[in-house]
Amino acid sequence: MSPTLLFGFVTGYFLLLLAVAYVTSRNSTNESFFIGNKNSNWMLVAFGMIGTSLSGVTFVSVPGTVGDFGAGGFKAFTYFQVVIGYVFGYMAIAYVLIPLFYRMNLTSIYNYLDHRLGRFSYKTGALFFIISRTVGATARLYLVINVLQIFILDKMGVPFVFTAFVILLMILLYTFEGGVKTIVYTDTLQTTFMLTGLVVCIIYILSNMGLSFSGAMQVLNEKGYTRIFDTDPSNRSFFLKHIIGGAVIALTMTGLDQEMMQKNISVRNMKDSQKNILTFTTVMVIVNFLFLLLGGLIYLYMLDKGAGYEGKQLLSEGRNIIGDDLFPFVAMNHLPQWVGIVFIIALISALFPSADGALTALTSSFCIDMLGIRRQPGLTEKQQKRTRMIVHICFTLVFMCCILVFKWIDNKSIINIILDLAGYTYGPLLGLFFFGILTKRTLRDGLAVTAVCLLSPMICYFLSKSAPALLGGYQIGLELLLINGALTFTGLWFLSDKRSPSASLPA
């Protein structure tokens, strides 16, 4: 397939995004950038959040996990255990967190920590969000940029550094003015393209192999690809670990994440925001199942085309295509040109929702939570905007540095890296918020709170590495996030006192 032709489609896609940004960002203010003037349509937010949550990691990594029977990855459809857990986490967001955030009329969700626990807790929570979202977003972004680099731009002699720079520049340009107000629309557009690519690829492979949906499920079942539940408690993918871990991941990476909740609280009222979450949950379950189905179909397709397993590798043309390489390799080398074009458009559509929202949310959190520009009465709208733009550019440069680090690491399964890192970085946020929500104790706020939030991930790292030797082969999986949150919660308990009867609850 001609890399020049593909590059032309990518360029056209960028121009379309800039056109949408131009239309939606007219007459934008700081309020538009931060929370879309609290006037976003809940249906658009729900649909656009699908693209943000799935990202290029789901699009590329999840299909590759289905036939990966080696150590360290998910096996068959066992990733769906995590998706089941997501449902429980999203329910908690809809009926616990959203009512709390709307009652307090928050612009940044971390203001809750300021009201309930104190300024050090507030700043610490915001800091952990900034670290978590920066690492997670750049890992996702790196994955998709790397695919574009390998299959298009390397053949054109364009270096990886230049590719990353141009893509980040494009994201900066179309989020610079409108922020959330623009992203609600661009995410909707991008999610549409991404899901279209998913469905087209499934239909083509089913048609090419002469299979119906039920026939495909039967063949996949015979190959052992459809197993969902892992019943071995010592495995990282044991079903209880994955379901509990999935619930906590959804609760933290969506409900305690400024990027995701920034869109939710941009909706007009609480009931619409709850409808947004419930709709989003239903679609997320269906779409994740389709990605797993696609992964199984791709493995069947490649086995039919002569690929074969050698130990823990699936070799095609002398290359191991298990994991993140599977879907891009097949789409670009073994499917018709028009399907390859659909794949590339869908892939870049999966790239941007996680990156543009993260960049906007990080800018918002840093400006509001760390710099406090909304609490400075003497700061004019123009001065706030200037500060916001400088911060936006600085985070773009930080993204660039992180992408280059991931390129240097060059891991083959980014989804495992993201989930592992989430266990360390989101745990303190989980502990902070739920200490405030579940207890009525008064925290002795200070540097000790920050120390507890830093110490908990360190202890978790030691536990994760030592567990197999200390616990007879037991491997800590996604439950690491819950352990981290529990350690933070416990540390905060020891830094707190019983609330006096006269102490008031947060607004």
Image (spheres, helix red, strand yellow):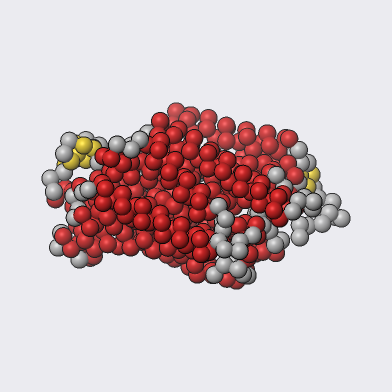
The percent coordinates of residue 320 (x first, y second) are: 23, 37
Q: Seen from this angle, which residue lies furthest right?
A: 502
Q: Tell me where residue 207 appears, x and y as whole percent.
A: 18, 63
236 and 357: which is toward the camera: 357
Residue drawn at point x = 35 percent, y = 35 percent: 159
| Quarter of the figure that contains the C terminus | bottom right
Viewer can see residue 212: yes
Q: Position of residue 20 (x, y in %)?
A: 47, 62
Residue at x 36%, y 41% (from the top left corner): 146
504 sits left or right of 395 in the view: right
- Please tell me which residue lies in front, 206 or 347: 347
Where 468 sits versus 308, above or below? above
- Drawn side of residue 150 relative to residue 94, left or right: left
Measured as percent of width and height from the top left, residue 324 is found at 32, 43
Instruction: Give the residue displayed 27% in from the left and 62% down from the top.
Output: 200
Quarter of the image where one finds residue 193: bottom left
Res 106 → quadrant? bottom right
Q: Nearer the viewer, residue 90 or 131?
A: 131
